[in-house]
Image (tube, coloured by chain):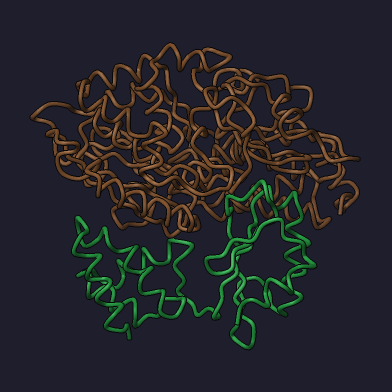
Chain colours: A green, B brown
Amino acid sequence: MLTTETKNEILAELAHSETNRMACIEALKIAQREHGWVSDEDLCEVARLLDLTPDEVDGVATFYNLIRRRPVGRNVILLCASVSCWVMGYVQLRARLLQVLGVELGQTTEDGRFTVLENQCLGACDHAPALMINDDLYHDVDPEQLGDILAKYA
Amino acid sequence: MAAFNQQSNPDQRPLTAKIQPDGRALSLKDCEAAGGYRAVRRALGTMAPGDVTQLVKDSGLRGRGGAGFPTGPKWSFVPMGDNAPRPKYLVVNADEMEPGTFKDRLLLEGDPHQLIEGVILAAYAIQADISYIFLRGEYVLAEQRLATAIAEARGAGLIGKNILGTDYSLEVHLHTSAGRYICGEETALINALEGRRANPRSKPPFPQVCGLRGKPTIVNNVETLCNLPHIVNNGTEWFKGLSLTPNGGTKIYGVSGKVKRPGLWELPMGTTARTILEEHAGGMRDGLKLRAIIPGGASTDFLLESQLDVAMDFDTVAKAGSRMGTGTMIVLDDQTCPVGMVHNLMRFFASESCGWCTPCREGLPWVEKILEAMERGEGQPGDLEQLSRHVTALGMGLTYCALAPGAMEPLGSGLKHFRDDFERHIRDKRCGWS
């Protein structure tokens, strides 16, 4: 169930959108802020608000990398897998990150604290390797500093 | 904030002249004090829309998003006059998702008002009613700064109804993407703005005539638009004079990989790759040798060390067998496995294929699996022929858009330049680098 606040935010977006459909991606992003992902139930609510079918909205939701249709942890780590990061030590950074958290790519830690996903390029190529945690960008990441970075997130 | 060349003469680097050393963005007031929005006042006050288009045509400005299409001629396909379909749209492609590319981030974070001024000028030239800035979702700081700058500009009457008291009106909206490389393709971007899956559209019709919501639409890259205020202020001869070659203006070049000083520099168009790598990026880290570069983002052909004296502009790099692309080069050093690098690139393209057309959807994962097996030591005789067949089968004209042909550029050139490395992986049944 989306909160009234979320629904109102989606309706506000709809009010200044040229068409209902043009608000679809933004509406999904707003809905996703509640739990970090969009459940079937939330997706149907978004569809009702936009007057689109759930299938239409799901077709959009499953296309885009930053809309998530499966549960995620409280913090989402986007590990940059771009060619620049690969040259600068992505493989070692990924190995260390997954080892520290005890998960595979795409998985969530047992305590629900972190989900690790790949990102195709964070655009921080001159400071590779890079990763993002929620809205925070970290660059020139030394695998040995990961503990300090992760400690900032509850 | 990325590093750039603050030491050089600001007159020679107009796009980055107002970017502050401490990384903050100028407020509207400070921006105007430094000459911002002068071009808008001049264009809207003294020039007809067609004059702006003609000026940009005469300047020879070419699109900085990667393809290098001439900007003025692109605009000239938009229907003009009272009978033109409405609304018309000017869309900013700020979806910088080409791996290894980080140049627009500098412009978006460092001087958002410069982009907005460019937007107003381009929109005025084509008489657009609405502009969308299509920004990639991960650029959080750029989003905040653009939102602030748009609000400031609206408050000052620089965007909105009757700009600066003229009869020209323009609404500007910021759209943040939900992420997908294909959104950088202009017709896919238009589908994304319409709230659809971002599959590319068939052309013709071209967006200039039938784009967003079926109306005339121009899609321009961030760096392209940022050039406009300076062309209006200083003229076409000045613009051409910034360049070392017939492709006018400056270019924001970037280097990533194992060089001493990775970064971004605004330099005369046509600066050689060697100058950028050695003088600006400081050369290779100690103990490493440069083997090759990918000159302009993931979808460009490798150039070998012996080709580094190429002038980095659209025409010269093309003659050397590659493309300037985005102008942000990625360095392959002699301690890094070229097969692994190509595998990383193919993994990217396979994952970002939109799935619309069969050669791309099926071919790219096949290529990726062959390379992955090769890296694991499970390469088979015949793999190289299979990869070469894909380079041909996914070439330009055989797929719906340029994604797969772009992917084939580093694969085809990699197979050519690093043949020994590929063969050794198969023969020795292992990657000798890891």
| Residue drawn at x 35%, y 69% as measured from the top left | A28
Q: Residue extending furthest left?
A: B82
Q: Position of residue B319 (x, y in %)?
A: 61, 17
Instruction: Give residue B377's quadrant in the image.
Output: bottom right
Q: Position of residue A89 (x, y in %)?
A: 76, 55
Q: Nearer the viewer, residue A46 or A145?
A: A145
Quadrant hosting residue B320: top right
Residue B343 image position (x, y, % from top left): 70, 49
What's the residue at 47%, 40% (across, down)? B399
Classify B162 as above or below A31: above
Out of B173 and B33, give the one closest to the viewer. Answer: B33
Q: Which residue is at 53% across, 53% downward?
A: B352
Q: How many marks?
A: 0
Query: In the rendered view, does B148 fall on the left or right side of B372?
Result: left
- Quarter of the image with the N terminus of chain A is bottom left
x and y percentages locating residue B27 in the rendered image: 40, 47
**In which quadrant of the rendered image does the C terminus of chain A lie?**
bottom right
Question: Which quadrant of the structure image shows residue A117?
Answer: bottom right
Seen from the viewer's position, the closer of residues B375 and B224 is B224
**Whether residue B47 is situated above or below residue B325 in the rendered picture:** above
